[in-house]
Amino acid sequence: MAIHLPDNPARSDVLAARPTLWTNPHYSENAIADATLPVRPSDVDEARENWRLAPLLEACFPELQATNGEIRSDLVPLEAMRKALGYDGAEFGTLLVKADNALPVAGSIKARGGVYEVFLFAEWLARREGLLKAGEDIRRLAGPDAKAFFSRYTIAVGSTGNLGLSVGVAARALGFRATVHMSADAKAWKVERLTRLGVAVVRHDADYTTAVENARIAAESDPTIYFVDDEQSRQLFLGYSVAALELAGQLQARGIVVDAEHPLFLYLPCGIGGAPGGVAYGAKTVFGDNVHCFFVEPVQSPCALVHLMSGSADLVSVYDVGLTNRTEADGMAVARMSAFVATVMRRMLAGVFTVDDPSLFRWLLSAHHSQNLRLEPSAAAGFAGPDFLVKHPAGKDFCAQWQIGGRLAQATHVIWTTGGAFVPEDRFQAFLRTANEIGGPT
Ligand SMILES: *Cc1c(COP(=O)(O)O)cnc(C)c1O
């Protein structure tokens, strides 16, 4: 299918794979109130309440003792890196990093969605089969009889890597069998780590969308397989959404106000859209129209950008507009976004910007040197956000249209760094070498 993208200032940049900012012409006030959407603000509160699972997580993962079983990340000021990025001017307001790269259990933002969905399924299954009675301590599901029970079931998932890691780790911790269908982009170390955990890894010589399709078909024919569906899952989406409540508490603890005079901007790396979509949705439920969420994608894999820009009812992929989906940012190497996320984001997303691979490596290096952050390439994508918003013509137009231009100095920008803690040392050193070879300014 060849698609003609509509006339738009960003169109020629997108087609030529040049970094750019597209702002969403359908962006609307109070889009969250649309009753036809497949999710409700109350779903986010419900997902938060589901963290009654925390004692079970604490029992399964010793590293969660410090947080009583909650999977949380720090919110840290962008300090030394501000200057390196050219963000020292007052017009860049307050700059913060939401360090999901260091999330426990899975080492990426997938810990919020994948672990949550697997544990929720375990609880549901245990209740259905009478293993967990009303009022009984949830930690019973970490015991030996529960492990034996769960070992009769398989959790399956398709993944470019990190979702497979989070689902595989969670499934094995409870005693489930686990199968991860990996795309060709999946990094060898992620496959090795899963294999060591006893996860069956099926490698597909194909892209992410195909890996997911194969996994879904395998699961449909077998009632003992539970499929974590990255393209359609509400649970994953809602697991991610709870991060916005965490962020709200952290901003408040820092005395940072978010209101009409003090807007908040989120920069969220996007693959299929579940993680950034969930966080953006959660943020809209908390901050309403005072938060503006932008996705960021690689120049060759801007699946959310091309689909939302096309205005098409059918999903448009990056191949349809002649792009390759080739990038070192494996967490974002997705050619076709989730239809579910596209529906929810259509009027809620402020825009999407794109970044090239060399820039990802430069920011990865700079984040390591100046902020001691351990990032994988995908996780560094958000650093371009404030520059696009404040300096790019489309960003200036956006600020003018939404009466933000005069308030930039009192705005807060949150750059979401989405993964990296589990990258093995030799792989991380190789990233730094690549960055040094690329050279050039940050
Ligand atoms: C998965 C992932 C993303 C994007 O999340 P999606 O749900 O696929 O949109 C971004 N960065 C990293 C490091 C990831 O693992």
Image: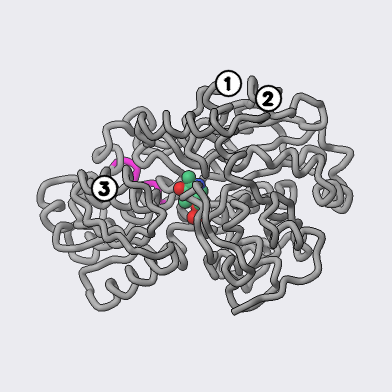
Q: Which residues are magenta?
A: 50-55
Residue underneath mark 2: 84
Q: Is residue 327 visible?
A: yes
| Secondary structure category for the residue under label 2 | helix
Residue at the image point whose x is 65% and y is 65% from the top: 306
Q: Amino acid at mark 3?
A: Leu
Q: Earlier in the sequence, mark 1 or mark 2?
A: 2
Q: Which mark is residue 116?
A: none
Left or right: where 434 falls relative to 97 = left
Left or right: where 49 falls relative to 30 = left
Residue at the image point whose x is 52% and y is 55% from the top: 326
| Circles 3 and 2: CB atoms closer than 8 Å | no
Residue underneath mark 3: 194
Q: CA distance from mark 3 to mark 2?
A: 37 Å
| Secondary structure category for the residue under label 1 | helix
Front residue of 27/361: it is: 361
Residue at the image point whose x is 78% and y is 37% from the top: 262
Q: Image quadrant for the C terminus?
A: top right
| Circles 1 and 2: CB atoms closer than 8 Å | yes
Q: Amino acid at mark 1?
A: Ser
Residue 56 % position (x, y): 28, 44
Q: Is mark 2 within 8 Å of ligand 1?
A: no
Disc 2 crowd, CA 10 A, few/some/many (<14, 14-19, 20+): some
Residue underneath mark 1: 370
Q: Image quadrant for the N terminus?
A: bottom right
Q: Earlier in the sequence, mark 3 or mark 2?
A: 2
| Secondary structure category for the residue under label 3 | helix
Front residue of 313/32: it is: 313
